[in-house]
Image (cartoon, rainbow, N blue to C red):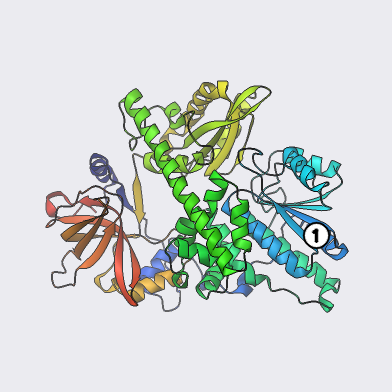
């Protein structure tokens, strides 16, 4: 396909361009798989059938995780001695699932006192901090014997030092990239620390916690701890690992796919936390047909909403609830908060669009020409939603974006909190590190990874940051795409429009970041269309080109204008899904984008 022509047509219509993945050089023998499915898997790095083994036995052993044995021994000591353990989590879904996992597993191992603490996004900021410990001490009298961080801690220099000064043993589990120095913890378990040789550095925070807990159980087993008590099966909580892994948008490498596949299997069998089942019900999803997309786009956002607008303690309590009625009540509250979050998000995006139209003559869906305009701020922005808004703008503009909101006031005055989202080829944390090196007094603090990062700076430094960002991003001009595009796996053959093919796709996931869900494109005749929900969504009846006798297929296109006149050929990028209604299963196509074929003929492939 001629990408330039496609981009021009797409840009004129306000749609995404369509580009096909390069065909893999060789398609390995993967059993009796459909040839198209084998090509899909090969294009995602599958070279051997063993990579498709999602059994528990195929999960990587813990060798190469730094400080794992030391951290496990310290936690096992606290369990054996009946000492109090405090789990300090993060206010996102990864942190919430990791916190719930530790409480459930440590309690099952026989720990006598395990509590948890989640910082408030607005009052405490991120991770273990002196302020968080001070507030905890005021309410509880003293800090516990052992503090276990999950999904945070590798950058908590002041917080770890404060905990050590108060007499606590500190074990850090984290997956974020460390800075030049590490905090003075007693053990730091992180697959991204220097010297780590573990085979899956893409582990989410909940995945790191899972490995530590497995090591704790092994250590207690070695000490004979389970001679008089039941030895818990950690696989019972892989539903939590799956949810946190998908919601944190980490790469689904071979090992993460196994962890997620095992968790999804438990959810489908209803062998999972009642809170997860309640969240599925609140989202109107059937857990018996759970896929990774449900965790990423329905369950994860409802859990994350608590940490964005209120306090993630509510989310952790939902995941810890054993009574189904309590779980439903908490899930209902999370659903309410998520609806509020969506409203706040829409308002913030409207402000961006209005600002651009007024100041630049642009529109919210068209990227501004100047890079300093990819940094957005408004005094009314909510600090808990800036990451989502940055992600939305990044997707619309296909540009790295930072969004700032007012944060706390310190001794130097008003601070701003920023959240950034990036595109492939531009490592956001490295970009911030370069800005910090060039302008040492500009950024108060920063952290993150390739695709997402956060920072804080003084309100009077915003314009300086905009200029510094524009200077650094200019080096990446050649990496900026012409516009939005979707990457497809090419066309399906007529015989692939069947339920068994879609079932095979679902079975060979889970799909997600780094292992993207298959997307195909074909030429279709649009037979007719029906507007849904005030014209925001459309139901289409389409027929593949050259298949005049074929039964029409139903396609759904969400959040789009009305660009498809019936009776002509369109190149449609779509995802085939199985829709179940009143016990009947049928094939549907979810449309990602569509482009008219010039003159109704074939595009230039």
**Who is closer to the viewer here, 103 or 151?**
103
x and y percent of residue 349 in the render? 40, 37
Residue that mark 1 sits on: 75
x and y percent of residue 392 in the render? 42, 43
Residue 203 appears anywhere in the view: no
Number of on-image labels: 1
- Residue at horizontal 66%, vertical 22%? 412
User: Neighbour class for label 1 at 10 Å: few (<14), some, many (≥20)?
Assistant: many
Q: Left or right of 302: which side holds 191?
A: right
x and y percent of residue 313 in the render? 63, 52
Relative to 117, residue 295 above or below: below
Residue 289 appears anywhere in the view: yes
Position of the C terminus, as image quadrant, is bottom left
- Residue at horizontal 20%, vertical 65%? 544
**Who is closer to the viewer here, 381 or 460?**
381
- Residue at horizontal 14%, vertical 52%? 565
Under tag 1, what secondary structure?
Answer: helix
The quarter of the picture where residue 586 lies is bottom left
Q: Left or right of 165: which side holds 489?
A: left
Q: Left or right of 544: which side holds 359?
A: right
**Who is closer to the viewer here, 273 or 393?**
273
x and y percent of residue 198 in the render? 67, 58
The quarter of the picture where residue 28 lies is bottom left
Relative to 461, residue 206 above or below: below
- Residue at horizontal 78%, vertical 42%? 138
């Amino acid at each position: 396909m001629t990408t330039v022509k496609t981009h021009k047509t797409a840009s004129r219509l306000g749609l995404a361009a369509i580009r096909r993945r390069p065909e893999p050089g060789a398609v390995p023998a993967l059993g009796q798989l459909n040839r198209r499915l084998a090509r899909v898997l090969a294009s995602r790095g599958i070279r051997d059938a063993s990579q498709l083994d999602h059994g528990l036995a195929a999960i990587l052993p813990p060798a190469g995780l730094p400080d794992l044995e030391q951290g496990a021994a310290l936690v096992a000591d606290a369990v054996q001695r009946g000492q109090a353990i405090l789990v300090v989590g993060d206010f996102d879904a990864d942190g919430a699932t990791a916190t719930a996992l530790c409480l459930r597993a440590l309690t099952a191992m026989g720990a006598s006192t395990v509590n948890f603490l989640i910082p408030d996004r607005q009052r405490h900021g991120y991770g273990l901090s002196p302020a968080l410990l001070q507030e905890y001490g005021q309410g509880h009298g003293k800090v516990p014997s052992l503090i276990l961080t999950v999904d945070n801690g590798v950058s908590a220099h002041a917080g770890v030092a404060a905990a050590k000064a108060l007499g606590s043993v500190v074990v850090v589990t984290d997956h974020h990239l460390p800075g030049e120095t590490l905090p003075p913890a007693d053990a730091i378990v992180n697959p991204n620390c220097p010297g780590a040789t573990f085979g899956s550095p893409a582990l989410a925070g909940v995945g790191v916690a899972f490995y530590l807990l497995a090591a704790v159980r092994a250590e207690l087993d070695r000490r004979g701890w389970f001679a008089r008590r039941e030895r818990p099966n950690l696989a019972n909580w892989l539903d939590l690992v799956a949810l946190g892994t998908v919601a944190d948008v980490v790469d689904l490498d071979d090992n993460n796919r196994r962890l997620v596949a095992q968790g999804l299997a438990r959810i489908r069998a209803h062998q999972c936390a009642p809170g997860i089942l309640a969240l599925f019900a609140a989202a109107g999803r059937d857990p018996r047909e759970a896929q990774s997309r449900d965790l990423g786009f329905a369950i994860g956002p409802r859990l994350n909403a608590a940490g964005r607008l209120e306090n993630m303690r509510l989310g952790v309590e939902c995941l810890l609830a054993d009574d189904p009625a309590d779980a439903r009540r908490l899930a209902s509250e999370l659903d309410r908060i998520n609806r509020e979050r969506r409203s706040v998000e829409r308002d913030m995006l409207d402000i961006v669009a209005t600002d651009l139209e007024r100041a630049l003559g642009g529109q919210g869906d068209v990227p501004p020409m100047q890079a300093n305009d990819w940094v957005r701020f408004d005094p009314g922005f909510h600090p808990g939603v800036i990451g989502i808004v940055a992600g939305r703008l990044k997707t619309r503009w296909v540009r790295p974006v930072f969004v700032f909101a007012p944060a706390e006031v310190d001794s130097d005055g008003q601070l701003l909190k920023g959240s950034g989202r990036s595109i492939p080829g531009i490592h956001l944390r490295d970009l911030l590190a370069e800005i910090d090196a060039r302008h040492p007094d500009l950024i108060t603090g920063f952290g993150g990874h390739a695709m997402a990062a956060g920072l804080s700076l003084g309100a009077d430094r915003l314009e300086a940051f905009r200029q510094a960002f524009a200077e650094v991003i200019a080096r990446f001009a050649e990496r900026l795409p012409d516009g939005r595009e979707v990457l497809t796996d090419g066309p399906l053959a007529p015989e692939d429009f069947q339920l068994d093919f879609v079932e095979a796709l679902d079975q060979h996931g889970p799909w997600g970041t780094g292992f993207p869900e298959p997307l195909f494109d074909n030429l279709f005749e649009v037979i007719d269309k029906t507007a849904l929900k005030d014209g925001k969504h459309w139901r289409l009846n389409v027929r593949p080109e050259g298949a005049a006798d074929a039964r029409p297929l139903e396609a759904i296109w969400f959040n789009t204008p009305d660009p498809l006149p019936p009776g002509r050929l369109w190149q449609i990028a779509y995802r085939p899904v199985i829709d179940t209604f009143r016990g009947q299963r049928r094939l549907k196509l979810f449309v990602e984008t569509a482009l008219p074929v010039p003159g109704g003929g074939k595009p230039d492939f």
